[in-house]
Image (cartoon, helix red, strand yellow):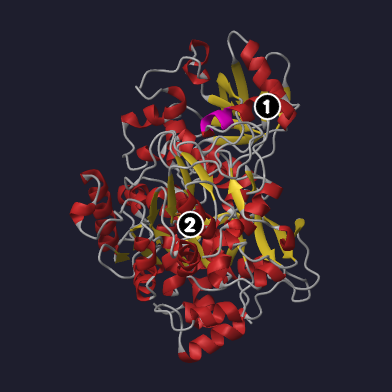
Amino acid sequence: MLSTGTSKPSPKHPRTLFDKIWDRHEIIRNSAGQSLLFIDQHFCHELSFHAFNMLKRRNIKVRHPSRTAAIADHYTPTTGERPENFSSLDRFKLYKTLESNATDHGVEFFGLGDDRRGIIHVVGPEQGLSLPGSTIVCGDSHTATHGGVGALSFGIGASDVSHVLATQTLWQPRPKKMRIKVIGRRPPHVSAKDTILAIISKIGTSGATGHVIEYAGPVISNMSVEERLTVCNMSIEAGARAGMVAPDYTVFEWIAGRPYAPSGQKFSEAIENWQALVTDEDASFDLDVEIDGTNIAPMVSWGTSPEDTLPITGSIPDPQKEPDREKRRALAGKLEYMGLKPGSALMDTPIDCVFIGSCTNSRIQDLREAAAVARGRTAKVRTIVVPGSALIKSQAEKEGLDKIFRMAGFDWRPSAGCSMCVGVNGDLVAPEERCVSTSNRNFRGRQGPRARTHLVGPAMAAAAAVTGRLTDVRKLERL
Amino acid sequence: MEPLVKILAKAVPLKQDNLDTDQILPARFLMMPRDEKYKTYLFRDLSHDENQAIISSFILNQEKFSDARILVAGRNFGCGSSREGAVFALVDSGFRCVIAPSFGDIFYNNSFNNGLLPIILEKQHVEELQNELFLDLNPELLVDLENQIVLHKSGFKTTFDIDPHRRERLLRGLDMIGYTQQYLKETEKFEEQYFLSYPWLSIR
Ligand code: SF4
């Protein structure tokens, strides 16, 4: 085995999955305990212009252009792949800036009309660019998603992006380690999204601050790769630096044959190596949390933070019952923003629109789950469905999911992108509209000024669409 | 980057917990270039109403706290999206230091890259400090990075922890890329080994 870094851990020292990946990427460690890490894969999107400008000011070229992929996703239209589909000239210019920065530096660009294009956190794994055991960064907080294939993957800011472009490395203090075990068995109709929402509502949005999470336990290892990606995606909403799941045969099989994945002899070698990427029996974590998956129900967020989440059968909390004055005020403020009555049931709250998409829930399995509910029913409110990548779009159309959605009156968008998750491409929720969304953030103004967001999984979103209310998908009448 | 050794400046208490980067810099400003206008985007939707009129009750709009260079914030400040623009907007508005019980990880990281000092203090200390600043007619605070001390004239005094390496960079105003390029040799040697050990990662 290789020895890299200045301090190699003794082989007898039990290590976690995280330790193993970290150690093999450590170039040096300085006296302050910061490690210089080698970065295998970097992704950048339209907002990387700050970082490219920093390079330009210093007249620096990208060190390893083939280790960065430039993918347009945030500002791109969902109504088509042509320049005129952009909702403004500014946005089109931003797109062109990404293209020219990529071209200038010899970085591969996934642009409009390219069937590899889509949301970065969907495309990376889908193309086989995100591999087990690798380090992956992107100037986007949901980069943790790629941990679903067993990578160490995290979001960075613009200065760090320029640093990675210039050096293919990054200085990082070694984070703490946390394990979240989900034991038991996930009940039917409970999705990966419900699982992560339940985790966040339990540990809070700063519950994992400063930590890298390893998700483990039978509920996690029984998940498909798509589901693991969904869970890891929201690690940041729990405050974590990154989230990951030990790679196993489910992952290896999923990766096999993807365009950028290794093949032939190299793939066999890789698998042999990847199999060792598991937490050793006696390795310890700074934090260990256990959750019983058997008790998880379909979840809905009610407030303006992802921790403000309850089972659909729950009721809106009452500020009067909150003893702490500050907290009482904060809670009242949230309910006012959300337009919700204290103590009322979540179920049957009328809604205005539904968004199915985002890097959390726009993969083929998500679309299948949503379509299964939409089939034979009719949307009561405006509902848009945005596939996570061009390939997912084709796959969904091949399976006829687009027809199911259209028949149900859902607006099936032909072009992939972030869309209404953040609204910067122009797909916005109107002020005070109540949107049921499969995205990951329900912050004030996230989906548009004064927009109200309820986070849910894809089947719950479709159930809300066809009833026009917050609905328990388990209670929908069988058709 | 301007070196940061000591700051004696006005400090503004902003009590709200979980102030995320969407509120520090609303998403619609993300595509804006970093020019003179950048500072006007800071806390835009908390400081201005829909008609772009100033909300006078927002604490940063209060006369007493104008020109503040230190922010004393709530728990989990800067959580949410990784946008470094949130730090740009703070720095361009004159802030050099944020004190809070905890920070969003990425925000915390980004701060150092822009000469903004994030200080983590015990929750009760932060609250005590916020209360002093509310009462104080001239809410000045001394942050001494060299000695790792926060001092208020009421007698409030506390030390803080900081990664020594990051402290050094702030004290000297060192740029990160230049610093790392000193390690180019080590990096190249590392890569050679690495690609031999993990050949499937060397292609492309
Ligand atoms: S889909 Fe939403 S959360 Fe994901 S990268 Fe795009 S904007 Fe960010």
Q: From the viewer's perspective, is the residue at label 1 or at label 2 nearer?
A: 2
Residue A36 visible, this angle: no
Secondary structure type for disc 1: helix
Q: Tell me the subunit letter for badge 1.
A: A
Where, quadrant-wise, is the N terminus of chain A in this rendering?
A: bottom right
At horizontal 60% and vertical 72% (from top left) the residue drawn is A4
| Magenta residues, start to end | A333-337
Q: Residues within 10 Å of mark 1 (few under 14, many from 20)?
A: some
Residue assigned mark 1: A328
Q: Where in the figure is residue A168, as x and y percent of width and height?
A: 45, 63
Viewer-proximal residue among A33 and A273: A273
Residue assigned mark 2: A462
Secondary structure type for disc 2: helix
Q: Quadrant of residue B136?
A: top right
Q: Amino acid at mark 2?
A: Ala
State yes or no: discs 1 and 2 in contact (Cβ < 8 Å). Answer: no
Q: Which of the two labelled residues, at mark 1 and mark 2, occupies the earlier sequence position?
A: 1
Determine whether B202 is above or below B6 in the image: below
Q: Amino acid at mark 1?
A: Arg
Q: Tell me the subunit letter for badge 2.
A: A
Q: Is residue A467 magenta?
A: no
Q: Quadrant of residue A11?
A: bottom right
Q: CA distance from mark 1 to mark 2?
A: 33 Å
At horizontal 32% and vertical 39% (from top left) the residue drawn is B32
Determine whether B130 is above or below A78 in the image: above
Apparent side of residue B48 relative to residue A199 in the rendered image (left or right): left
